[in-house]
């Protein structure tokens, strides 16, 4: 089953990918199933894929025609069973001695300027024009290209031919070894308008020295392994305290426990998913869906947890009352929007979605996130006012620390989002692909850091119930603080006469001093 680039309706793309991941997904194996070459300028083009590839560590043995196994240190792009099919009308109109060609061009992104050209400084063309052919710059009807000055022997151009009235042309299987690190592109091109409607079938296999993970994804394998270890360390600390003081546990701490478990589960599944993809080049569909769903559930529960903490659940109020259904509805909507986005981004082709398709899916998630933030800070303001009015000093101190941490997190998020927009808008050709993994890693690290702060503030202890909601002591005052404040207020409000009387009583009760005159 093929995984297609989404150039059409985003909704159609989602449903396509939804059915694809029920049948099996390819990753570094790019499949093409009747993909149509579409008109671009004076050429008909289909983009066969783009991936960051590192240079081979080991040289391929002479005379060995087989593809090296993953992890052997070789890096290559392999063309397997590539066939082109033209419409029956185009085949019938060809003469017996006619030869029509379709080309596959493979180049590194730094060499993009050597593809195409123009005769007199006019509009740039991909296919060789009669004017350029007269100048001897190229052969008419073929792709314009010049030798690379940075990468000798590149670009590679492979060719398949339709002879006479043949309807099918086959590209010879070939493996191109990568000797220079870069972002590589594959395009299938033909220059003959009479062959409009040509389609391509088959597959290309892309491999890095360490395995089949694309270059921009390979650092994430180590990252997910590291962040999984961090979750294990956090879990050991949290659940050891949880077991010691299990009689004092609050519902809020149960929610925190759930977030830790989901975080550890998500990162562990992603690690094994990336490891399997790196080993085989095929994405394990079930594992990917589990990782995506676990991540979306974790993010949803995390946002709900922060929201109910901000509302003072279990601290200022015993329940959320009528707000419970609204919180659940917001969480469910966020879950659905995020699940759709993550499935389309992760369970499918490696190539990025088109801008419009991604915007269509990202926009609802961004709006819901903004609503969460607005509701959280509004609730925090109300909760802080209540705690201050009731003089619950210990609880007030915790909530102020929580508010400061959340504010820093939001500022860092906005700053990083601005950097992410800048990074992607200035990297149109993915030239900085080796650093792209940091974008995703930062969000995981930031959410983990906030979780650590929440765990430190609400860690299970023998004084846990001190921070729980209580009706005792009038308006929920902490008993110790309430009695201390009551004593101070009573003394400060006493009249001078009362204070003088107390002083006289103390003096009278004192033992008589000896008469030193004797």
Image (cartoon, rainbow, N blue to C red):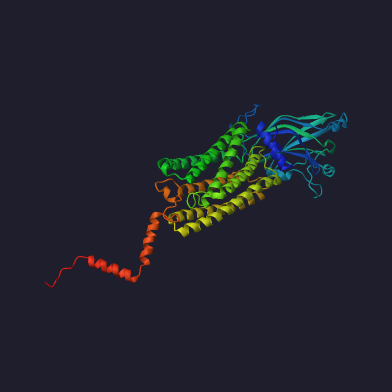
Q: In this view, does 44 lie to the left or right of 272?
A: right
Q: Quadrant of the C terminus?
A: bottom left
Quick one: 167 or 97, which is closer to the camera?
Answer: 167
Q: Quadrant of residue 68?
A: top right
Question: Can you give x and y, in whole percent of width and height, for residue 15 in the image?
Answer: 70, 38
Q: Quadrant of the N terminus?
A: top right
Q: In this view, does 470 lie to the left or right of 57?
A: left
Observer able to see residue 73: no
Vertical comparison of 61 with 450: above or below: above
Question: Can you give x and y, in whole percent of width and height, for residue 332 in the image?
Answer: 61, 44
Extreme left residue here? Answer: 518
What residue lies at 54% left-to-right and 41% top-to-bottom? Answer: 223
Quick one: 458 or 233, which is closer to the camera?
Answer: 458
Observer able to see residue 16: yes
Question: Can you give x and y, in whole percent of width and height, for residue 286 in the image?
Answer: 61, 33
Q: Count the marks: how many?
A: 0
Q: In this view, does 26 lie to the left or right of 157?
A: left
Quick one: 463 or 367, which is closer to the camera?
Answer: 463
Q: Quadrant of residue 336?
A: top right
Question: Can you give x and y, in whole percent of width and height, for residue 391 in the image?
Answer: 44, 58
Extreme bottom residue here? Answer: 517
Vertical comparison of 306 with 74: above or below: below
Q: In which quarter of the image is residue 75?
A: top right
Quick one: 390 or 300, which is closer to the camera?
Answer: 390
Vertical comparison of 378 with 1: above or below: below
């Amino acid at each position: 089953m093929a995984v297609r680039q989404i150039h059409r309706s985003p909704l159609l793309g989602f449903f396509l990918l939804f059915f694809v991941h029920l049948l099996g997904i390819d990753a570094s194996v790019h499949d093409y199933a009747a993909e149509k070459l579409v008109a671009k300028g004076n050429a008909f083009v289909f983009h066969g894929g783009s991936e960051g590839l590192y240079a081979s560590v080991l040289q391929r043995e002479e005379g060995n025609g087989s593809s090296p196994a993953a992890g052997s240190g070789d890096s290559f792009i392999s063309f397997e069973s590539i066939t082109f099919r033209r419409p029956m009308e185009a085949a019938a109109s060809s003469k017996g001695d006619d030869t029509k060609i379709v080309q596959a061009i493979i180049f590194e992104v730094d060499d993009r300027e050597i593809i195409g050209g123009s005769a007199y400084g006019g509009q740039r063309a991909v296919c060789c024009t009669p004017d350029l052919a007269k100048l001897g710059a190229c052969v008419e009807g073929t792709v314009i290209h010049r030798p690379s000055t940075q990468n000798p022997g590149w670009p590679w151009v492979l060719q398949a031919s339709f002879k006479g009235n043949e309807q099918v042309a086959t590209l010879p299987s070939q493996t191109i070894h990568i000797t220079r690190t870069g972002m590589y592109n594959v395009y299938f091109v033909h220059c003959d308008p009479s062959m409009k409607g040509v389609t391509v079938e088959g597959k290309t296999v892309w491999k890095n020295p360490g395995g089949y993970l694309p270059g921009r994804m390979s650092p994430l394998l180590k990252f997910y392994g590291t962040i999984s270890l961090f979750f294990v360390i956090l879990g050991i600390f949290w659940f050891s305290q949880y077991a010691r003081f299990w009689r004092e546990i609050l519902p809020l701490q149960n929610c925190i426990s759930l977030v830790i478990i989901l975080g550890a589960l998500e990162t562990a599944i992603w690690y094994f998913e990336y490891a399997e993809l790196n080993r085989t080049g095929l994405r394990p569909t079930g594992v990917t869906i589990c990782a995506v769903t676990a991540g979306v559930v974790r993010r949803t529960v995390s946002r709900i947890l922060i929201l109910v903490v901000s509302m003072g659940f279990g601290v200022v109020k015993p329940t959320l009352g009528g707000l419970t259904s609204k919180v659940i509805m917001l969480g469910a909507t966020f879950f659905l929007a995020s699940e759709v986005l993550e499935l389309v981004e992760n369970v499918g082709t490696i190539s990025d979605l088109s801008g419009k398709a991604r915007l269509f899916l990202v926009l609802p998630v961004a709006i819901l996130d903004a609503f969460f933030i607005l509701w959280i800070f509004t609730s925090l303001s109300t909760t802080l006012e209540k705690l201050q009015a009731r003089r619950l000093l210990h609880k007030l101190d915790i909530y102020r620390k929580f508010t400061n941490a959340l504010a820093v997190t939001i500022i860092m998020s906005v700053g990083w989002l601005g950097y992410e927009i800048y990074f992607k808008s200035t990297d149109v050709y993915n030239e900085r692909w080796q650093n792209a993994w940091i974008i995703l890693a930062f969000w995981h690290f930031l959410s983990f850091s906030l979780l650590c702060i929440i765990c430190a503030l609400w860690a299970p202890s023998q004084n846990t119930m001190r921070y729980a909601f209580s009706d005792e002591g009038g308006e929920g005052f902490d008993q110790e603080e309430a009695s201390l404040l009551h004593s101070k207020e009573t003394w400060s409000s006493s009249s001078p006469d009362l204070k003088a009387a107390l002083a006289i009583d103390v003096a009278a009760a004192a033992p008589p001093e000896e008469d030193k005159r004797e």
